[in-house]
Amino acid sequence: MPLNPTQYSERRDTLALLLRETADALRSVSDEAQYIQPGLIQGHIAVLLAIRNKVFEDQFKLVLVARFQGGKSTTFNAVAMGGRVISPMGDGAIKCSASLIAARNCEDPALRGVTLKWRTVGELEHLCADVLTSGPIDLTTPTGLAAARAAFEAEFELYQASRDRYPADKIELLPIVDLITRFVADPALGAMQQRLAANPPSAAGVAKLVRFPDNFSMRWPNQAGGFTLEESLFVFLGSTNLADESSSLKRLGLEVVDCPGLFASRYDTSVATAMIATADAVWYLLDGKAAGDGDLKAIALCRQLAKNALFVSVNLKADINPTRKHITTKIMPHIEGQLAQAGVPVALQPYHALLALLSQTGARLLRGGEYADNTTFMRQLVDDWSLEIDEPNAAGYWSALCEHLLDRLKSGVQDFRAAGGQLNEQTLAIVERESGLTHILGQLEQFVVSSRAHTILITRGVNEAISAVENGVERPLAALEATANQDEKTAYDKYEEAENALARFEQVVQEQLEFIEGGQGRLLDEQLAEEFFEQNILSAVPGIASGSADEIANRIKTFKIISGYTGEWIHNILGQQTAKQIIQSIVQRRSTEVIRLRAVDWMKQLGPEKSQALATMFKQADRINNNLQEFWQVGAGKNDELEKLGNPSLPVDVFEVSSFSSFVENTLIKDIGITVGINALITGILTAIAVLLPGIGTFFVAITATVSALFLKYSGLTSTGTGEKINIELCKVLNTQLMVERKNIIDRLLLPEATTGISLSSFRENIVAALKAPIEKTRIRFDAQRHDAEALFQKASSEREGIAEDCRRLREERVVPLRLRLEAYRSETEWAWRS
């Protein structure tokens, strides 16, 4: 039975205190053990403090997902920002930026702040391609940029001519593409980005960066030319990461990510999908109305990507009947029925996002904290709803808003009024209760504890601390004590023997690693890429063909309705070349969407039992590890100096894991310096897929040439007939062309994508890194130990006797008790975990 949240919090707080005390004690030992290299002990003290900080930081990624106006940004401000209004909340007339906003608790004040990541040119081109379907987009050259701007002007004319029939999936992106093509080459853009990198904005400044300009929906398109570059920065901002002290995030150890609203555009959806793929848990917020087809599909997608780590709440707001009773007894059961019928049974949680935000804002006000943005936000809501208030201040606005919202809910308002109707501990507790936030956070906390507590407390917590104490202090002290008691010649001879033995061991390591790092490694990479191709690309053809065929057929129907032409209408309206470009855009996008979803599922479940390539990698790595352990034990058994270093090989059972994800979690992620985490692997490979398909030789040339002919051939049929015919023939051409391009695609899967440096080769490279890391650390410890011994022999023999005694005393009286305390904590926690 896993720990409950209260037990976990107690164990975590105890570990943090123990790590702090251990670090302080080692610092004291370092001051006294002056003949041990200070850097060695200080390095391990830093490890202890990093572990201590990490238990309160981003051990668990929670991604907020919703349709536009679903309450996710309001929730982000409540959960991640402690009630501060940082993430922009849509006003119902315009949508908010597609920029990701992530927040995590940060224990180290020196590391707090805001990090901005700007969209690459490739990402901007990808965004533009969703609107400008007349050909490839190139924003890197003056000619390409001019062509993109001309394409936008043509698209804008089409929009102006038929606004009521303009595709809904394009209209949200049209102004974004306008601003991109207007400002992307402006030298002032780079200057602003550099200035913000040198002087990052405050948390409050972030709100202005990611929010659409004031009155955007009224100013565009009629006053489009009036937008300044500074107002348009949100278009170029890809993500914002806030690291600050946060009691709510510290409690759960969460990193919270506010995704773009699903379905605002295809690009927004792709950004959100990529983030969901790397989430530890997803919180999907429904808006209090009956779930539409888009919601059902999105929740099914989240369930597919996040597995059982999916939480779904219904925001207690509605236009017609906003009472809690109506929503919980009528709306929620109906939505649960819809989800069950769609094959996605989910228990819904009642939740009021704005009350949740106000509960956090009220708590801050009671603590004596007040932010101008919050006061402005509340005053605006008071004005919008024409509420009467007694005191025109933050507390007065808060009271009026809470009473109004509770009255709309017809729930809790009598209790609120009975408690005085003003901001106090009692009214705040009522608002917290009615919001449902505490209940949902409790469920999340239990999920975090059950899924990650053992890893956080044991694997990446106390085990690492014990290793730091042993390798950083205890073993060096023992080595110095033994050396000080030896005569100089004997000690030098032993270190020379140890050096030769260690050098031989390192040579054996290199020879062994050739089996997985040299030419054989490349073959293993290619085998993994072959599996990826078969299971995620080739098998995706039916889904790609079906979706593309339906969209092409609907496009035919739409153009025929708009044009009024029959027969050869395509030549009269678009021209043959444009038809090819439209088809290429459709098939390319469908290919990316389908393959990305398959790839995420494949990577999350990737394990030796499902992948022959990975099984071979693990088998060879396990054999290498066993060989190294045997060789080390023989060498170390003949030399005291090597034996004092500890075993440099991985534990025997490291590769006995069910999946690559658990291998990364349990083995590699302990040392961020040597590996790429599973989330980064997923994100990197998804990025590579996004740019893979458009550039694989003749693939789309052949597809578009073939399907263009189908476009004309079947244009006289009904949309249903057209879709069926195109689907059959599109399957054929996709299969044929994928097999032609097979080698080319596999090569590209193994070529790191420029923006991430990650490819399918990263899987094997992680395994190699796991094997190399302990060997490299052993060399560092040995060199430090030998250096200390050489310094020791500069002393007189009488002084060395005193040093030996000091080392013994420090080790036995100070260091060993520290290690025993840590081991006792580990035993207690393991017992609590199993009981």
Image (cartoon, helix red, strand yellow):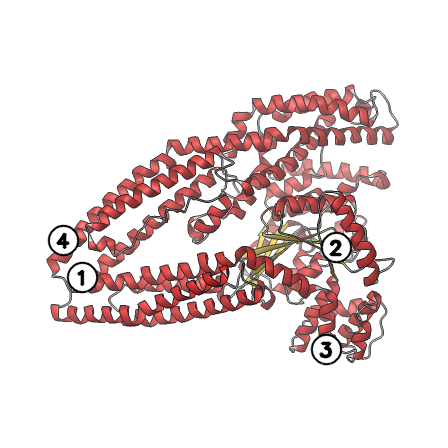
SS assignment at label 2 = loop
- Neighbor class of circle 4 (other Cα within 10 Å; few <14, some 14-19, many 20+) is few
Please say if the residues under marks 4 and 3 sit with CB atoms less than 8 Å apart: no
Q: Which residue type does callout 3 highlight?
A: Gln
- Give me the disc on residue 493: 4
Residue beneath disc 1: 483
Gap between marks 1 and 4, in whole Å? 11 Å
Q: Which mark is residue 70?
A: 2
**Mark 1 to mark 2: distance in Å?**
68 Å
Q: State whether residue 313 is above or below residue 686.
A: below
Q: Are marks 2 and 4 in contact (CB under 8 Å)?
A: no
User: Which of the marked residues, 2 or 3, is nearer the chain's N terminus?
Assistant: 2
Label 4 – label 3 distance at C-alpha? 76 Å
Q: Nearer the viewer, mark 3 or mark 1?
A: 3
**Is residue 383 shown left or right of residue 138?**
right
Residue annotated with mark 3: 426
Work out how far the residue at label 2 is from the one at label 4, CA to CA, in angstroms: 73 Å
Identify the residue shown where x is 60% and y is 64%: 202
Q: Is residue 116 visible?
A: yes
Of the numbered discs 3 and 1, the one sitting upstream in the chain is 3
